[in-house]
Image (cartoon, coloured by chain):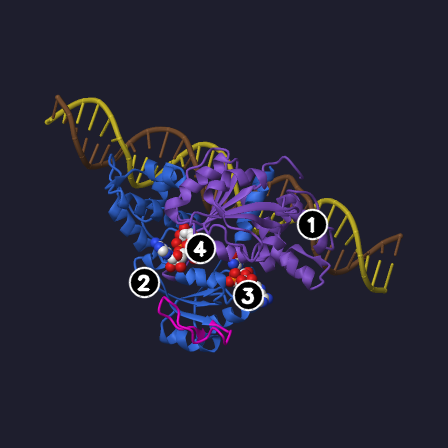
Chain colours: A blue, B purple, C yellow, D brown
Amino acid sequence: MSSETKIPDATIERVALYLRPLEKLMEKRNQVVSSEKLAEMCKVNPAQVRKDLSFFGGFGVRGVGYEVHDLLIEIKKILASDREWRLGIVGLDDMGMALLYHKNFLKRGYKFVAAFDSDPQKVGKKLPIGLVVQPVTKIKQLVKDLDIEIGVITTSPSRAQDIADIYFEAGILAILNFSPIQLRTPECCLVQNVDFTLNLDHLAYKLSQ
Amino acid sequence: MSSETKIPDATIERVALYLRPLEKLMEKRNQVVSSEKLAEMCKVNPAQVRKDLSFFGGFGVRGVGYEVHDLLIEIKKILASDREWRLGIVGLDDMGMALLYHKNFLKRGYKFVAAFDSDPQKVGKKLPIGLVVQPVTKIKQLVKDLDIEIGVITTSPSRAQDIADIYFEAGILAILNFSPIQLRTPECCLVQNVDFTLNLDHLAYKLSQ
DNA sequence: GTCAGATTGTGAATTATTGCACATAAAAGG
DNA sequence: CCTTTTATGTGCAATAATTCACAATCTGAC
Ligand SMILES: NC(=O)c1ccc[n+]([C@@H]2O[C@H](COP(=O)([O-])OP(=O)(O)OC[C@H]3O[C@@H](n4cnc5c(N)ncnc54)[C@H](O)[C@@H]3O)[C@@H](O)[C@H]2O)c1
Ligand SMILES: NC(=O)c1ccc[n+]([C@@H]2O[C@H](COP(=O)([O-])OP(=O)(O)OC[C@H]3O[C@@H](n4cnc5c(N)ncnc54)[C@H](O)[C@@H]3O)[C@@H](O)[C@H]2O)c1
C-alpha cells in the first residue's frame, strides 16, 4: 500500500499508541511481536494493527510477526519522532512546571529550549533543568534564534489567545494548548488541545449509564 | 429521536466539548446561540451540532436557535456532570499536585476528597486545599468511607498497575490514568488514559507532512 | 524437500459517522 | 393574517473506519 493514500487520523493516533508497548517489549528483550500480541497490549483489534502498519509498508514477516526493534524505528520514522523537536513553553505555574520538569519528553525527543512567563518575579530565575525564565516579550526573538517548532501554552485561559498570536507571528506552526479555550488560529497552523475535564466528563457519562 | 438509540462515542465527546463555548456565551450574556455559531466556536459542522443534540431531544427552537442557559443545563444533565463527582488521587509529585491545586475541576463538579502517596515524608502533610496526605494503605478504606467514584493515577509508571488494582479492589469503576502504561483492568471498569506525548507525536507527524 | 503451523497483508463486507438538503416551525414585519 | 426570514430536526446519501476472512508466504521439523 505504502505512501500517497490518505492516511486516516485515527491510524496516526494508534500508530503513536503502539510505541509504548514496543518500548516495553524492547526492555523485556522480546525480539519479535505478533499483531495479536501488540493488539492485546493496546486493546485494539489485531487486523487493525496490521492494516495501520500496512499503510506505511510491509514491516512484518508472514508466519513470524514484526521485529520489535525495527518496528519501533519505523514508527518513529513515520511519526517524524526519530529526531529532536524543540519546544517553547509559556506559563510557568504548576502545570507548566510539571511539564518542564518531566523527563520523559526528552526521552522521546521533545526538548524544552525556552520557558517564558510574564511574571517579573519569575523572569530571570534559573530553572533546575538549566533554562532561565524569559519574559514573554522575548518570545518572538527566541522562537527564531532557538528554532522553536512547537509552542506549548500553559498560561491562564485569559492570556492564552494573546500568547498563541505571538507564537504564530513568530512563525510557529504547531501549538499544544493546555488552557481550556478554543484558540483562533491561521489556516496553516496546527493546534492540539488538552483538556482533562473532557476525560472526566466522559467517565462521568459512562458511569451514569 | 430521544433515548435508547445507541449514541456514538464521538457524539459524547463533542457534546462535552460544547460546554466551554456555552460557558463563554453565558459570561458574555448571550441568551441564544445557533448551531452555526456554536459549530464555529468548536470547529465542527453545524449539522453535526444539531444531530448530536437531537440524540438527546429537541432543545432548540426553529428559526431561533438554542437557549444558552438551558442547553448548558441539558448537556450537563446528559453527561451526568450536573452533580458532584468525588475523586481520589494517588501520586503527589508535580503532576498530581498541579491537578489537586487546579480550581477548575471543582467548578465543574469534580472534587478531590482524598490524596494518597507512598512517600512517608509526604504522608500526614496538610495540603492548602484542606486535605491531609494519606498513605496508600488507606486507599481501600477511604474509597469506601468517602464514596470515591473516580480514581486518578499520577504515580510513576512502575506503580500505576498496583494502584489501579487497589482501586479496583476497593470497588472503583473509573480511572483517569496519567502514567504512560496500558492498565490491565476488569471488564466492568472504565479507564481514560492521558498521554501528552501522543499529542506531541501527532503534531510532529503533521508538521513533517 | 515437503508438509504443518504460524501469522502477515489486503480485498471485500460490515458497521459507523458525517454532512447535505429540505420539510418544518417559529418570529418579525408589514 | 399573510409573507419572508431564519434556523432547527432528520431522512438519506456519501464517506470513512473497522473487522472479517483468506490467500500468500515464511519457518522449522522431519
Ligand atoms: N509531569 C508531566 O508533565 C507528566 C506528563 C505526562 C505524564 N506524566 C506522568 O504522570 C506521572 C507523574 O508525573 P510527575 O511529573 O508527577 O512525576 P515525575 O515522575 O515526572 O517526577 C516528579 C518529580 O520527581 C523528580 N523525579 C523523577 N524521577 C525521580 C526519581 N527516580 N527519584 C527522585 N526524584 C525523581 C522529577 O525531577 C520531578 O521533579 C508519571 O507516571 C508520569 O509519567 C507526567
Ligand atoms: N493544573 C492543572 O491540573 C490543569 C488542568 C487542566 C488545565 N489546566 C490549565 O493549564 C493552565 C495553567 O494551569 P496551572 O495549574 O499552571 O495554573 P492555575 O491557573 O490552575 O493556577 C496555578 C497556581 O496559581 C494559583 N492561582 C490560581 N489562580 C490564581 C490567581 N487568580 N491569583 C493567584 N494565584 C492563583 C493556584 O492556586 C495554583 O497554585 C490554565 O489555563 C489551566 O486552566 C491546568
Q: Determine the CA span between mark 1 and mark 2.
A: 45 Å
Q: Secondary structure at mark 4?
A: loop
Q: Amino acid at mark 2?
A: Glu
Q: Amino acid at mark 3?
A: Ser
Provide the residue span drawn in magenta: A117-134
- Label whose residue precedes the other's in the sequence (3 or 2): 2
Residue at image coords 41%, 44%: B160
Mark 1 and mark 3 on one chain? no
Residue B99 position within the rendered picture, expressed as x and y whole percent measured from the top left = 51, 55
Answer yes or no: disc 3 within 8 Å of ligand 2: yes
Quarter of the picture holding the N terminus of chain B: top right
Contact flag, marks 4 and 3 (Cβ < 8 Å): no
Q: Along the line of sight, which residue is nearer the eye, B67 or B132?
A: B132
- In the picture of the structure, the residue carrying the numbered disc 3 is A156
Quarter of the picture holding the C terminus of chain B: bottom left
User: Which numbered tag is attached to residue B73?
Assistant: 1
- In the image, residue C24 above or below residue A92: above
Answer yes or no: disc 4 within 8 Å of ligand 1: yes
Q: Is residue A62 in the magenta section?
A: no
The answer for which chain carries disc 2 is: A
Mark 4 and mark 3 on one chain? no
Mark in front: 1 vs 4: 4
Q: Determine the CA span between mark 1 and mark 3.
A: 25 Å
Residue A91 position within the rendered picture, expressed as x and y whole percent measured from the top left = 49, 67
